[in-house]
Structures are given as C-alpha cells and as structure tokens.
Image (spheres, helix red, strand yellow):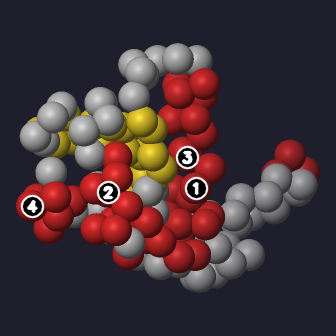
Amino acid sequence: MICHLCEQYQVETLRFNTLFVYKPFCLTCEKKYFPRFYQEIIPCEYDEILYNFVYQESMPSIRHNRLLFRHMKVYFRLIDAGNYEEGIKIIIDFIEMRNFQDWFPFIKGMGKVYFFSLFYYDLTVFAELF
Ligand SMILES: [Zn+2]
C-alpha cells in the first residue's frame, strides 16, 4: 500500500488478523502527525485571542490539511460541550488566512475570540490588526 501523506510504499506482512485492516498512513507519518494540541494567547487591544492549533508546523500541502482535518474533531467536541466561554469561535485555514486583513477588523472588539486551526499560522505578521 501507499501512504496517503508521504506517498511512500509501505510493506506490511499480511496476517489473518490484519487482512482487512486498512492503514492509510505509514508508521513514520503516524508518528510525525500524531495530534498534539497547542494554545497561544495573543493579547489584543480589547481582550485576548486564544489561538488553538493541532500541529506546530505550517501546512505542508492542501492534501495534508484534507487528510488530517479529522483531528479537529477534538475541538469541535469541546466547543459542542461548552468548554469554551462565550465568544467568537473561528476555524481558520489557508483560505481565511489569505483574507485575514479583510475580515478580522469586523470581529475586533466583540469580546473574546477563539481561533482554531489544524496547522500553525503565524499571526504575528498581522500584529498591527490586534
Ligand atoms: Zn507516510
């Protein structure tokens, strides 16, 4: 089989108990992309922004984003269970980051803001907006 992330062949010994087990990622990628959850607090003029992300690295490719997006379900469950206070919760990805300067001023001053993303985006480049 071919790993969906690194596109390398993975050789596995087939046994009866692993005959119908499908692993989309190789062991190296499973270790490399094991979900770890990080939080960054960004002070801003009115309140603070809590930026939550799963991987510390920047997005390698759109394919990686699509294949690993299932790890965001932890955040969705926490939001659904009400673990975050009142405030605006925004899931950001590469599309939102392209237009960040356009939409961010509209949420400025509306209280606590939570950002969620799969890969890390350096928000310090937009420091003048906060
Ligand atoms: Zn791999």
The residue tagged 4 is 128
Q: Are marks 2 and 4 in contact (CB under 8 Å)?
A: no
Label ID, residue 69: 1
Q: Earlier in the sequence, mark 3 or mark 4?
A: 3
**Residue 16 visible in image:** yes
Under mark 2, the amino acid is Phe
Tell me which residue sits at (11%, 59%) in the image.
127
- Between residue 30 and residue 121, name the one nearer to us: 121
Under mark 1, the amino acid is Phe
The crowding category of the residue bearing disc 2, from other C-alpha atoms within 10 Å (few below 14, some 14 to 19, many at least 20), is some
How far separated are the C-alphas under marks 3 and 1?
5 Å
Local secondary structure at mark 3: helix
Q: Are marks 2 and 3 in contact (CB under 8 Å)?
A: no
- Between residue 53 and residue 48, name the one nearer to us: 48
**Residue 10 visible in image:** no
Task: Tell me residue 110's x, y (percent).
Answer: 32, 35
Q: Are marks 1 and 2 in contact (CB under 8 Å)?
A: no
Q: Earlier in the sequence, mark 1 or mark 2?
A: 1
Under mark 3, the amino acid is His
Considering only vertical position in the picture, is 108 above or below 20?
Answer: above
Badge nearest the viewer, 3 or 4 = 4
Local secondary structure at mark 2: helix
The residue tagged 2 is 104
Tell me which residue sits at (53%, 66%) in the image.
65
Task: Tell me residue 55's x, y (percent).
Answer: 36, 53
Q: Locate the N terminus by quadrant.
A: bottom right
Label ID, residue 71: 3
Task: Tell me residue 33's x, y (percent).
Answer: 45, 56
